[in-house]
Amino acid sequence: MKIGIISDTHGDYTSWEKAISYLQNADLILHAGDVLYHGPRNDIPSGYNPKKLIAAINDCKIPILISKGNCDASVDQMVLNIPIQSPYVFAVIENKRFLIQHGDNISQDEIHDLIFRYKLDYFVTGHTHVPVLKKHDNCIIVNPGSTSLSKRDDGINTISIIDDDGIYILDIETGNKILEIKN
């Protein structure tokens, strides 16, 4: 199975197209929120075109699970054909337990508690626009970063991919792996 993990697209159609080019054969996409609106604290992304992004997401042949971000509103759900779930998405995929939560209103202690309560294999978050990939006991905590508004020092926009080899963070411009945990 191949699972794409993205977050913080913020209405940027161009970065969605770059990200999705790496996910063409994915079985599922997990989106950790902030789908359409750029947000009042962010600059407008260079590829900002929420109407085109709406169409691309609605037409996407790959199933997508979306957790509501702090920039997602009720009006977004009116235009997307995919449910924006709030505040958590819980899924069991090939006997692996996933919990997705945007990350804007959760503490490290709460994350720790959720990991143990739900016996999670993956805790997926977003919000910071900085990728994270780390083990916490038997769980992998992953923040794919942002496809459009990176807050990394080098400005690299990123996604994450889980496949048979493990999980990694990918630069959507070059395709280079920048973080990785192998199986």
Image (cartoon, helix red, strand yellow):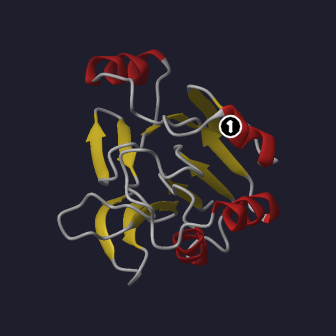
Looking at the image, which is closer to me, 51 or 58? Answer: 51
Task: Locate the N terminus by quadrant.
Answer: bottom right
Q: Quadrant of residue 182?
A: bottom left
Circle 1: residue type: Ile
Left of 65 or right of it: where is 6? left
> Could one spot residue 61 in this view of the protein?
no
Left of 83 or right of it: where is 105? left
Q: Residue at x 39, y 19 (%)?
A: 116
Q: Estimate the x, y position of residue 65 in percent, counting from the top left.
A: 66, 44
Looking at the image, which is closer to me, 134 or 119? Answer: 134
Provide the residue designation for mark 1: 84
Left of 122 or right of it: where is 33? right
Looking at the image, which is closer to me, 183 or 160? Answer: 160
Please tell me how many numbered marks the rendered image carries. Answer: 1
Where disc 1 sits, the SS reads strand
Q: Residue at x 66, y 74 (%)?
A: 24
Q: Residue at x 42, y 20 (%)?
A: 114
The correct choice, above or below, for 159 with respect to 66 in the image is below
> Could one spot residue 31 in this view of the protein?
yes
Q: Quadrant of residue 98?
A: top right
Q: Residue at x 38, y 58 (%)?
A: 43
Left of 129 or right of it: where is 15? right
Q: Estimate the x, y position of residue 90 in percent, counting from the top left.
A: 60, 30
Q: Estimate the x, y position of residue 135 in percent, counting from the top left.
A: 28, 42
The correct choice, above or below, for 154 with respect to 71 in the image is below
**How crowded is the residue under tag 1: few (<14 C-alpha within 10 Å), some, or many (20+)?**
many
